[in-house]
Amino acid sequence: MREHYDAFTQQAANNVALSPLSFLERTATIFPDRLAVIYNDRKYAWGNVYERVKRVASSLRAKGIGIGDTVSVMAANTPELFELHYAVPMTGAVLNTINIRLEPETVAYILDHSDAKLVIADTAFANVIGESFELNGNDLPVVNIVDRDGPGGEPIGTMTYENLVDDGDPAFAWQGPEDEWQAIALNYTSGTSGRPKGVVYHHRGAYLMSMGTPIAWELPRHPVYLYTVPMFHCNGWCHAWAMTLTAGTIICIRQVTGKAVFDLIAEHGVTHLGGAPIVLSMLVNTPEPDRTALKNPVKVMTAGAPPPAAVLAATKALGFEVMQVYGLTETYGHVSQCLWREEWDDLTSDEQAELQSWQGVGFPMTETIDVIDRDTGVSVPSDGETQGEIVVRGNTVMKGYYKNPEATEEALAGGVFRSGDAAVRHPSGYIQIRDRLKDVIISGGENISSVEVEGVLHRHPDVVLAAVVALPDERWGEVPCAFVELKEDSQATEDSLIAFCKEQMAGFKRPKKIVFTELPKTATGKIQKFVLRQEARTIASKTS
């Protein structure tokens, strides 16, 4: 009877808060001498990593870092950033990884909005941090990551990351989170507004994402993973935790180039890597002398704007086995995958590549991924034609937006996360994105707010009106394209406006194409962006 089943209580013996941090102790205990991280000539075994992490966590705790504090990190994919995925949350604090391509103004906003208590930064980004402090009037303590293989940079202050390691206690004992809903990470992402929103992850979601990834990607024990995904983006798709679970070997790469990727695959026997479609294009377009033939297939997870079928086919010809996935910062990264089906085996390579570009079906840890009618909330028919909005429900949906209850309520309305992406569902059940409901441009895996770019263009004294949409691009997937109305007798040119934007924002955000024209408007004066999107597609088709 039910009362007998309900008579039990949760106790310490049978209820432990889920956290991906538990993977590190397990792997370090079982495989202490197996290589965990390789970065150029630096190599750390899992036992080394675990001790270093505990030392750093101990030092951070001694500096007053504790539960609910934000520690902001601006660093490239080096061993330090991997270790901080464990050391910061071990103190109970929240890891805030900052996009290293951002300009000082946005970094200043993030440091202020996130309530950062400490900044850990690679000296290569010291100038950006310093300028952001000046903009904010901040004087936060800074710990410098000094990478002898990096481009250098003048440290801020005297404390270094290795000081944290040297001064820390190797016997530091992590007690686990207070509960699994406790925040573990804070990631900022551009939405439809110019200001980025802070997406909050919890320990439970990070744990389940890390458990679901090996199943979906069919990861073996001890994979050799080349970390081409920026660890600042969705915590590197949570692969820092997933690769620890599988006791893999992580190869860090600071500057991703085709030659570097091929060289590292050959040197270390890389089995897996991840990246935006631009990484695939980069591999395909790597000059023949810079390529090394693959001895074994390398499995690639790619996400972002769907890669062109031609790129997928060319990548496969090089020996890479690509799986397209879909997700957002708000969902810890990937929540659906284009799972290969046996009936596709006999199709032509072009047909296979087209199917591989679909967003597919839910990951194992995803409870629901659906395409619904935005007005009725009812699932669209699986006819491959009827468009609706992708919605997600599950444990890998964010807690919400930091200090933004209104946006949180809107995003999670109806008991699902509303992605803002328009898609169809095919008879096979596979989802395929057809358009973007949000005006976000995904360029090389990076989200760019059209509103932010428009705001910069409107600062130019000759610009009357500007609208920015996505321009399809073979290399980047999408790039910003601006349609601009100028003042009468203006002498501004496409090159001069792009140069103006270059001074105002990060390079990847500035428009790559500017068209001078009268913007199409509705009767009420609203810009008809769907007309501009069609024009952008026409421009792309003429230049391809």
Image (cartoon, rainbow, N blue to C red):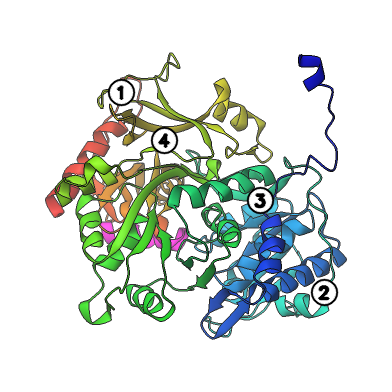
Identify the residue position indicated by label 3 in the image. Answer: 185
Residue nearest the viewer, comparing 128 with 475: 475
Q: Nearer the N terminus, badge 3 or badge 4?
A: 3
Q: Nearer the viewer, mark 4 or mark 1?
A: 1
Spatial CA span between label 2 and label 3: 23 Å
Spatial CA span between label 3 and label 4: 24 Å
Magenta range: 493-507
Q: Nearer the N terminus, badge 3 or badge 1?
A: 3
Q: Position of residue 307 (x, y in %)?
A: 29, 51
Q: Nearer the viewer, mark 3 or mark 4?
A: 3
SS class of the residue under badge 2?
A: loop
Identify the residue position indicated by label 1 in the image. Answer: 382
Is 452 located above or below residue 239 in the figure? above
By secondary structure, the bulk of the magenta-drawn segment is best described as helix
In what quadrant of the picture does the N terminus appear?
top right
Q: Position of residue 327 (x, y in %)?
A: 46, 43
**Looking at the rendered structure, which numbered label has been put on residue 438?**
4
SS class of the residue under badge 1?
A: loop
Question: What residue appears at the point 36 percent right and 38 percent down from the top-left corner?
Answer: 360
Horizontal side of 342 relative to 361 (left or right) equals: left
